[in-house]
Amino acid sequence: MAKKKSGKVKKSQRPQLGDNVVIPEAGVVMEESITRTLEDNYMPYAMSVIVSRALPEIDGFKPAHRKLLYTMYDMGLLKGARTKSANIVGATMHLNPHGDQAIYDTMVRLARGNESLLVPYVDSKGNFGKAYSRDMASAASRYTEAKLEAVCEELFRDIEKETVDFVPNYDATTTEPTLLPVSFPTILANNTLGIAVGMASNVCSYNLAELCETTIALLKDENHEIKSTLPAPDFIGGGTILYNEAEIDSIIDTGRGSVRVRSKWAYVQEGNMIEVTEIPPTTTVEAIMDKISDLVKDGRVKEINDMRDETDLNGLKLTLDLKRGQNPEKLMAKLFRLTPLEDNFSANFNILIGGMPRVMGVREILLEWAAFRTECVRRRVSYELAGKKKRLHLLRGLESILLDIDKAVKIVRETEQDAEVLPNLMIGFGIDKEQADYVAEIRLRHLNREYILKRTEEISGLEQEIGELEQTLKSPAKVKKIITTELSQVAKKYGEPRRCDILYEVPEDEVELEEDTLVDYPVTVFFTREGYFKKITPQSLRMSGEQKLKEGDEIAQRLESHNTAEVLFFTNRQQVYKSRVGECEDSKASLIGDYLPARLGMEEGELPLYMVLTDDYSGFMLFLFQNGKMAKVPLISYATKQNRKKLINAYSEKSPLVWLEHFVQETEIAIQTSGGRLLLVGTAQISQKTTKNTAGVGVINLKKGQTVRSVQHANTLELRDEHRFRVRSLPAAGALLRSEDVVEQIALGDEVPAAEPEK
């Protein structure tokens, strides 16, 4: 039997590109402006993220949320029974082209079981995880079930009456709403986080009943005092809001501000333990436990024996077992300061209005929502008006045949062609085509006077309703009344008590925590050039000998202080690290001390330059830069209410730093240059700036190649004619320093350099 020939072509027989084939611009390197490349390639992506993905719109939803909720509404899940989450995810892909996991994650966050939202929209069954836990993940979509919550009826109210615009979906097989006609301000009813390109949004939630009451008051009076009805945000996880009037005013007016939220706890005397049951919305149980564990390991928290996460079906519970004799109030005060048990919610109300991102305060957002809802109500009224007018028009045609039913029957019976029925009825009764078609479609059994009379009795009622609808369209007050009535109904039906308590007055003793937890006693602190720090008690210092230092190191500062003083370390990266003297263990002269870059967690290559000890942040810092400018910054600028341990932009980076020092009161300093000049500068001559990284003011003029040789206190020098080195206005070059000007040569360190010739 003959073998079949293989259909494969040998490599040598495949067609090859000939030498004479030329590919246009092959191998040519094209130059193109990077700005044009960014505009053509990156800008469309950035705008798509901003407008179509990350930021919420005035109805309170991002596109992904809106597509999911509308799909569930279209599936009949507002009134029907729950269905598998996988069914919902699959149906949503008709509107949302992203992956199924992204859609399911969106639904999980909207679910009541996840406890992310103050007003949940998805009625869930099964494990949907918990927002307050990093490790409690939701089950797969094939195991869980869901439907819409009853409150979603307010999201889709009258959506079928053309209250909002519909657009085609991504493949033009169906349509979806551009916005949902929400009947209450959903934008502020739930917290929303969105990170776009170059901008972000972080909206905090407010109590639904308070929100509706405030919106009603604003509709009646745009100058309504919002704080009287909407005192502070409200979060699903509860907790205690530490009221700060300035921050609340900032959120109301500008849409930016910070809300401090503190966990709720209780002391159980029987087990000598603390139970935390509510935490801030910005953290998780695991994050709190990790931070407490680190503090215990570092020895900064010594009052805790054990820690357990006892969260169960009854809700969140974090238990801390205390050592015998510990004060739970003082321990919690320390933990509030050092852990996320007390945290800040940073509000940034960046919302899309008409496709454009805008940062707005609470007042402006509610007024924008009122304008949006007004348009929805007007469109609904217009839709109803058009329907009633059409119905009235048809009934008037029906009324006309009431005069002679037999005539109508005769016309239909005697008309030979079906197409001529409508024209003959129009001629016979003087009605238009729509009326004639309505009359012609009446069933034979309904061609009786009773049926026709009942239908025509609707005419007077329709005329009255049409008149009322027309009046509503002409009257903004009536539209507002409709909105306020709906808001009142929502507040009554779905409003719940506040979950967050408000603490209007924070006791002062809670602010100064370390005063209570650290024992105060005198100490001597040492700071070296290489960045080592140690504190030694007076008793130990008297008994010790020479201070042990790393080879090549030397003591830069030695100061008398006490254990509860604050210490600030300025570094070569324009940063300040803050601590308490008592946070370091007592040392001895025989030890080299703590290496600050490692202890304070400094960046790689970052070194401390100068140490400041303070109790009240009095005095000021002086910074002299290589360009001859000097900055004077009050030390109080480095104090923070949040007790941050690290501050950036501690001083200017525009020119290299030459010298810095802390002064408690005004004094005079001497600046000596490598050119043999000396300038006496009074610190009072330098204007004070509250901005930490200010560039400063010009103080000394340096010629090319010259540098500042030394800076010291003027009272350490003895000059024969010190007035020669003072000037009335700055900057100045200073006066030439001669050997006869100096009474004690040692005061200036090395020998006075040869003076440059006078010009």
Image (cartoon, helix red, strand yellow):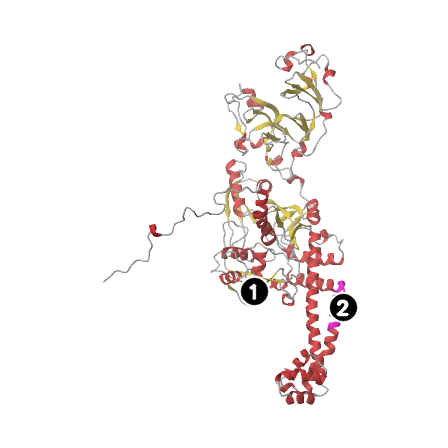
Q: Is residue 233 visible?
A: no
Work out whether 291 lies above or below 661.
below
Residue farthest to the top? 740
Mark linked to residue 537: none
Residue 497, picture quadrant: bottom right
> Hey, what amino acid is under mark 2?
Gln
Q: Nearer the viewer, residue 331 or 137?
A: 137
Q: Nearer the viewer, residue 591 or 28?
A: 28
Q: Is residue 385 visible?
A: yes
- Residue placed at 66% from the left, 25% from the top? 628
- Spatial CA span between label 2 and label 1: 36 Å
Work out whether 473 lies above or below 366.
below
Q: Is residue 452 magenta?
A: no
Q: Is residue 310 left or right of residue 228?
A: left
For the magenta stretch, what is the residue range?
Answer: 465-478
Q: Earlier in the sequence, mark 2 or mark 1?
A: 1
Q: Quadrant of the C terminus?
A: top right
Q: Residue 95: image x %, image y %? A: 55, 60
Q: Residues within 10 Å of mark 1 (few under 14, many from 20)?
A: few
Q: Quadrant of the N terminus?
A: bottom left
Label 1 sits on residue: 174
Helix or strand or loop: what does disc 2 sit on? helix
Mark linked to residue 471: 2
